[in-house]
Image (cartoon, helix red, strand yellow):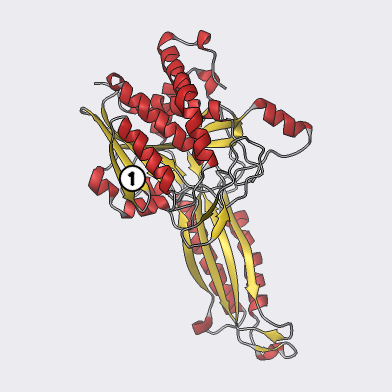
Amino acid sequence: MLTPLSLLAEPFQDLQGEVEQHYDSELKALFEHFHANPELSFVEVESAALIAERLKKEGYEVHTGIAQTGVVALLRNGDGPLVMMRADMDALPVKELTQLPYASTVMQQNSEGEMFPVMHACGHDVHMTSLIGTARYMAAHRETWAGTLMLIAQPAEEWKLSGAEAMRAARIWERFGTPDYAMAFHVTADLEAGLLFASTGAAYSAVDSLDIIVPGIGAHGASPHRGRDPVVIGSQIVLALQTIVSRELSPREPGVVTVGVFNAGNKRNVIGEEARLELTVRSDSRATRAKLLSAIERIAINIGRAGGLPDDRLPRIELKGGVPVTANDPDVAARVVMAWEKRLGTAMITTYEREGMGGEDFPFFTQEPDIPSVYFAVGGTTKARFKAFADRGESLPSHHSPLFEIEPRSSVISGVLGTVTALQALMPLR
């Protein structure tokens, strides 16, 4: 929801007017190109090449091929902080069902050689386009900031292996400098297009994927007393896990423990040798994350003991990966919001309560060492689209849906305005 130019102070009129002009002359076509030509995780070859080309054109020092397709671009502008802004590039293995004139019809092999239809069903096309818009504005207006701007185009935010973690493993801080501040944003279908929001707490949750392997002692189904049934023990574990959030966390502390898969047995009259539970665990703080994982292990092992399993055949936990909590630095978030209010006006700023506990791999950039950071949200759905679905009594298609659709103009422009304003606040002229 962009504010009419006539209602804005003159300095912001210049900023918004310039970004709007850039959108109409170049960014609109660029967004439509990214949307129509999505690429899967770690094979974002053309997207990365196009971003690198545009950033070189704006005078950035560009480094490519980092963690396969990652891009790091630097613009040095005198003494001041090093500030990083990240955009993720990858799309999803989803067949697009929207009626957009630039809808994707792409089929692509993923990094493991499997063929899938591909769609930007999570808005990363907005992120890439806004990054290029930000790059151009910051390069053209060096008189408004001081320091070093680091722009990162990251692969594989949507993949089981994190592109952010892979870029850190490629030693980008050692090669290009450790940022003093880090930023990113995500366009969201749950907010009106063009609105901005920055939480002073957790922007996204920690996500842990883990398996519980429950050994059994095999026997005939007609003689269960001669074995130890992993289905029964596993079922008791599933039920007991539900008490962790309800009885071990504070009622005001969010947490999720979900058992999504329960595999066991091959034949109805055989007590098998093993059951496997696959879990997703969500939390909004490091302390809660540690508490949940510890409780899961304690419950699984001791229910195994209670079920009569010997000490050498107790349930065990296998961690399959995860991401830390995306925790905004309260001071940095407040500083950014204050800059938005002063320069963009309060009409563009909103509040927003997350309905779920989705995760992000951005904190791999901001931990070890800890870097003060802010991850903000940009609205992506028009009032008319909200109303159309409400009038039909239907839920708005969510991220990762084949019907996911973003209004690009307001989203990209506000993405650039929010980012530029935040960067100028964090990199002020001395």
Q: Percent x, y for residue 188?
A: 56, 36
Residue 118 seen in render: yes
Side of 385 relative to 295 (left or right): right
Q: Quadrant of residue 153?
A: top left
Query: Residue drawn at (39%, 26%), measured in percent from left and top?
Result: 420
Q: Position of residue 109 (x, y in %)?
A: 51, 57
Which residue is farthest left?
Answer: 79
In the rendered image, which residue does mark 1 sit on? 370
Q: Is residue 267 above or below residue 124?
A: below
Please name the amino acid that badge 1 sits on.
Asp
In the image, what residue occupies the spot 62% across and 60% down? 243
Task: Tell which of 52 and 138 is nearer to you.
Answer: 52
Give the answer, above or below, for where 339 lies relative to 165.
Answer: above
Across the whole image, how many numbered discs are drawn on residues? 1
Q: Please tell me which residue lies in front, 222 or 340.
A: 340
Q: Which one is in front, 341 or 76?
A: 76
The residue lying at 55 percent from left, 43 percent from top is: 120
From what the image shows, is residue 392 above or below residue 256?
above
Q: Report if residue 376 is visible in the image.
A: no
On screen, residue 423 versus residue 130, left or right, reads left
Q: Quadrant of the C terminus?
A: top left
Q: Nearer the viewer, residue 160 or 199?
A: 160
Residue 51 found in image quarter: top left
Q: Residue at x 62, y 62 (%)?
A: 259
Badge 1 density bin: few <14, some 14–19, many ≥20, Cα 10 Å:
few
x and y percent of residue 387 in the render?
72, 28
The quadrant of the rendering that contains the N terminus is top right
Q: Position of residue 334 (x, y in %)?
A: 43, 28
Q: Secondary structure at mark 1?
A: loop
